[in-house]
Amino acid sequence: MDDWEDRADGQAGASSSQQQRPGMLRLNPSAPTFSFNPGASTFAPSWAPPPTNSGAAPAAAAPEPSYGQPAEPARPAAFVLSDEERRSLQAAAASSSNTEVEKATAAMADVHMADAAPARVKPLAEAASAPAQSAPAAAKGPPTAAAAPPASSGAAPAPMDEDEEDDEADHAAREAELRRINEELSKADDREHLNIVFIGHVDAGKSTTGGQILYLTGGVDERTIQKYEKEAKDKNRESWYMAYIMDTNEEERAKGKTVEVGRAHFATDKKRYTILDAPGHKNYVPNMIAGAAQADVGVLVIAARKGEFETGFERGGQTREHAQLARTLGVAKLIVAVNKMDDPSIIQEGGKWSQERYNEIVAGLTPFLKSCGYNPKKDIIFLPMSGLLGHNLSDPVPKNICCWWKGGTLFSELDGIQPLERDPLAPFRMSVIDKYKDMGTIVMGKSEAGIVRKGDRLYVMPNKVPVTVSAVYRDDVEVAAARGGENLRLRLAGVDEDEVAGGFVLCSRSKPVPCVTYFDTQLQILDLLEHKAIFTAGYKAVLHIHSLVEECEITKLLVQIDPKTRERNKAKFVKSGAVVIARIAVEKPICVEQFDVVPQLGRFTLRDEGRTIAIGKVIKLPKTLKAGD
Ligand code: GTP
Ligand code: MG
């Protein structure tokens, strides 16, 4: 037997007494935040925090938070690496290869953690009713107060107090109330919200496509585009002007590479979207992980240009790593956008798109994506496009350019994605990505489960600080209530800004999120480092789970699973490609959930020296540790 229960008891006290957790961010102080991109709001007004109708100052009015990048206060740095870390990442990345990854992933097919991703995760419709306009118009202009119901109106009645001592009657009343709110939210606007992450190899055209989408949906005006054209030309990067819409900092523009995950909103008359534009460069995989961890759907951008698809897809290329990571991180659906179909290296006579090249890429990628756990029939949609020219994004590609494409556009495919389900009655969970001060403490994050309303009384975990929600901003518009799957900012009363950190979780008081210092996990070992080729108890790595980055140690290797026979055998050590059940411990309590309860808070990656060495899901938490203690 093991010491599961004993240790659980021991840590309960430690958890409750814990206050600020200086150790948590020791490795990488800025790491747990992903890059929200407020600097971009000048170009895409819909990102700008709007005026509110509550009289409370909106987020926009707040001084920009300090994220340790004084030179660029408008752009909070995410996973900003120290020079030392960056150097070690670069060295590790240079030697990176995915040799075992594909084999291991194939072997994992039966036990792949993502296979168990419940289909009940669903972002439901919004509380605020952005006017139901046609796609091009919907994203124009900043969201206005008129688009959001006042905090006291409609969807959100006076919140019901919720406490751990609540009895059954209290719970029943609250459930009835939540059902009613949920219905009202649906009536207000049944457009669901989707977080899409753009992933893929460096230079595939992710930022260009993101920028083009904003342009097409009215988020960027002609003059701004002209300004970027000039700026890009001055930097000898003429063709990057569309990417400048998403790549807002100097370093990104000068190098033509996204570093931090950019974020933007757009809407069609069917859905509201948040774009998360991940960096493709291998040095910034931690940022990509942070972006993908919040996504419902991935757009894997592939450059069809001659040689580019091949480079991205070869071992060590980010097409492979991103697709695998995205699957692990819960991105259940993938749109594979075969981009740069207009490129001179592959274009045919008369400027026609090459069906041959398209088919070659689809045929090359399909078996690999299948090995990642995607079902080619149900989970993957391929389409050709040109992000730069805006072809096959919102409107079908003109027939004189491509007569053979009979499928949909990027927008129509996104609109057609089956809604994921989220249980409105589930206890509220929001992992904190970032925080700052503005008439109270504002925390940013994605709500993963349950409904939150203005006035709700929650805990900030793991410190168990009781707080009251004094305002809810969804996509920066103040709303009365919001459901799971939304990007939120919550203004909190009762907590100091420095009592909250990235990786903390806001949760319901009656059913707080579990806080643990160890948990059992099913791990798929990918490519171990050459000089650390043995995975065994004592292995130390960096755990990336929801918005948390924490040093961890494998304290026990429990069993190895044979992926074919599912046979379980004791193992003292394993090598690349193995599938194991192991126990992972961290120094101080962290908030996690079992994968089968809240998958978004129960799946993770282990990284070491800048390389992803394992992907995993939390399968068991210490039983006797009462959630929230
Ligand atoms: P990272 O952020 O560094 O990973 O790159 P990215 O995927 O965001 O690529 P980005 O949008 O910065 O574009 C890279 C280069 O590809 C730029 O020169 C773009 O103009 C070019 N590009 C992007 N999309 C297209 C396209 O549809 N056609 C052509 N011909 N070029 C494109
Ligand atoms: Mg980019």
Image: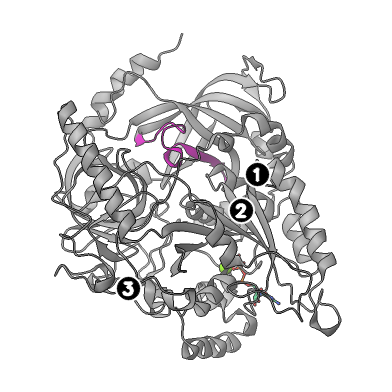
Please say if the residues under marks 2 and 1 sit with CB atoms less than 8 Å apart: yes
The residue indicated by pointer 3 is 143
Amino acid at circle 1 = Tyr
Q: Position of residue 152 (x, y in %)?
A: 15, 59
Q: Is residue 620 left or right of residue 98?
A: left
Per the rendered image, the range of residues in magenta is 590-609
Residue 264 visible? The answer is: yes
Q: Secondary structure at mark 2?
A: strand
Amino acid at circle 2 = Leu
Q: In the rendered view, would you say 337 is above or below 353? A: above
Q: Which of the two residues, 383 or 602, is positioned nearer the viewer here?
A: 383
Occupied quadrant, residue 100 = top right
Please tell me which residue is depicted at 64% across the width and 34% down the height of the picture. 532
Q: Position of residue 543 (x, y in %)?
A: 48, 39
Occupied quadrant, residue 578 = top right
The residue indicated by pointer 2 is 334
Q: Position of residue 240 (x, y in %)?
A: 60, 79
- Dot 2: within a 10 Å radius of its alpha carbon, few (fewer than 14), some, or many (20 or more) residues? many
N-terminal-most mark, 3 or 1: 3
Q: How is the image coloured?
A: one colour
Which residue is the extreme one toward the top? 1
